[in-house]
Image (tube, rainbow, N blue to C red):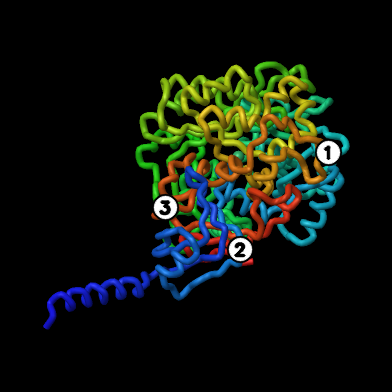
Amino acid sequence: MNYKISILSCLTILLIGSCSESLDADLIVHNALIYSVNDQMDTYEAMAIKDGRIIELGPEHQILNKYKSNEIRDVQKAVIYPGFIDAHSHFLGYGLTSSQLDLIGTTSFEDVLNRIDSYHSKNESTWIQGRGWDQNDWETSNFPHNDLLEDRFPNLSIALKRIDGHAILVSKSVLKAAGINKSTTINGGLIVLGEDGEPTGVLLDKAISLLDAIIPALGIEQKTAALLSAEKDCFAVGLTSVCDAGLEVDEVDLIQRLQQDGKLVMRVNAMYSAKPEILLNYTNLGIKTESLTAKTIKVYCDGALGSRGARLIDVYTDDTNSNGFFITPADSISKWAKMCNEAGFQLAVHCIGTDGNRVTLDEMSKVLGGTNDKRWRIEHAQVVHPGDRSKFGEYNILPSMQPTHATSDMYWAEKRLGSNRVSWAYSLKSLMSQNGMIPLGTDFPVEEISPLNTFYSAVFRSDLEGFPAGGFNMDEGLTREEALKGMTIWAAMSSFDEEIKGSLEVGKLADFVILDKDILSCEKQDILNTNIIATYLSGQTVYEK
Ligand SMILES: [Zn+2]
């Protein structure tokens, strides 16, 4: 036997063998334009997925030659991005709105009354809860009065939340049951009085909590149904991770149970609402799995601009008697900051007005001390005095912002703030530059849930009709690439999840979305007409058009 030849033939067999033997994958997606959203913004044509994770990305022939799978999807040149992440939303609250009276888009208070009428004709209950009115959409943009509720619906108990959740209108019977009258006082909120000195039924911020014992509590079944219906809607718009910016401890536990039972698969960054019982019990809290992060305390520093609850350094331009109020004063914010620092929690504080932002930045700074990687967050960071901007960078505080707030508020924000202060508001670019990143969200149900709206508003800063010409404070707009990062990798970073999601890279979760247009290059008017073809979570289809 010729020794040399036999070695050569063995080698040949080995080589041919290894080439023809493909590797197993659970899913191969190809013929695509895949934006990995990694540091280099690399693009690929195909990817292979196994056990819910990406095992390789590369050119078409490389992936198809190397892997075999029972599931091979040719997406016919469609575009793939990492699954969208909403960095600030209210997942449960959004789900619950579908079981309540919907008042979004009402054009007058008469419209509200008519919707109550038709809702009541289909629902037996004498208790009616609704959400979504915005007096800024009405011709007379004053707060409503419950006299009109009394005239039309004297036998109903009614509670109607404003779109932002920072104001509520309740009927007289509800005020009475809660023991609220003209002499009731509350810190961090307001009981709005009419010209006759009597309560009008409108309550702002902390005053809403006076109704806690009166408004019928929701059961686990209702909350479960709400979470599942919210999940379905979110998958349909390409979201694979959402936030819930303020939950009770038992609500976070409910989400975890539903995930463990395989009923809910949406990934959730759940923030605990800052309640006194949390201060007592925080050592027992905190969850970190691939599906659920609960390592954040959410505090409301001030109210909202629309209801003039946002705390400003100077008075409102359209109400010179008021500069808003603190829901949580500086000393309490300091307490929460110390607790979070000790327990290794993130602190996330809702700040709208110049004073709300300043006080929170200063209290956070005192505890943080300087450069750090705690990723504490200011939620909204809506009207920040230019002199305070650098504090975000110096103390690595993240501005968690919602681009659609700018394009929803732009019609009336100047009335509240005047022309100088409005130029400081919704300053995405200035605040992004502080840490070189910015997590983006919608604050749904305050805004619509679609991340495409976030993208459009961040980049073009205009409404669908192209108002205002040239965009609202265009200097503060983001590039398309920055906006995409804000709803993927930077949003993942804002909950310490960038190692597992936010970009399409080997080893990361196969959470991705297939779109029929490339939002990084298509025409402006096509962005909002872009279709979600499919949404995948851990390599499994969770939405298919
Ligand atoms: Zn919110």
| 275 on left or right of 139 | left
Could you tell me residue 448's position as x and y percent? 68, 48
In terms of secondary structure, where does tag 3 sit?
loop
Q: Earlier in the sequence, mark 3 or mark 1?
A: 1
| Tag 2 residue | 77
Instruction: Read off the residue under disc 3.
Output: 290
Q: Do the residues labelled 3 and 1 touch (CB within 8 Å)?
A: no
Residue placed farthest to the bottom in the image?
1
> In front: 66, or 198?
66
Check the picture and name the quadrant holding the N terminus.
Answer: bottom left
Residue 506 picture location, percent across and down? 41, 55
Residue on which disc 1 sits? 147
Q: What residue type is labelled 3?
A: Glu
> Type of residue at label 1?
Asp
Q: Does label 2 or label 3 sit earlier along the sequence?
A: 2
Residue 302 lies, in percent from the top left, at 61, 28
Q: How far apart are marks 2 and 3 (CA)?
A: 30 Å
Q: Which amino acid does label 2 sit on?
A: Lys
Q: Which residue is drawn at 62% across and 31% down?
A: 429
Residue for point 56% across, 69% down: 74
Q: Which of the two discs, 2 and 1, labels the residue nearer the N terminus?
A: 2
Q: Which of marks 2 and 3 is in front?
A: 2
Which of the two residues, 271 or 289, is positioned nearer the viewer here? 289
Comparing 50 with 125, the one in front is: 50
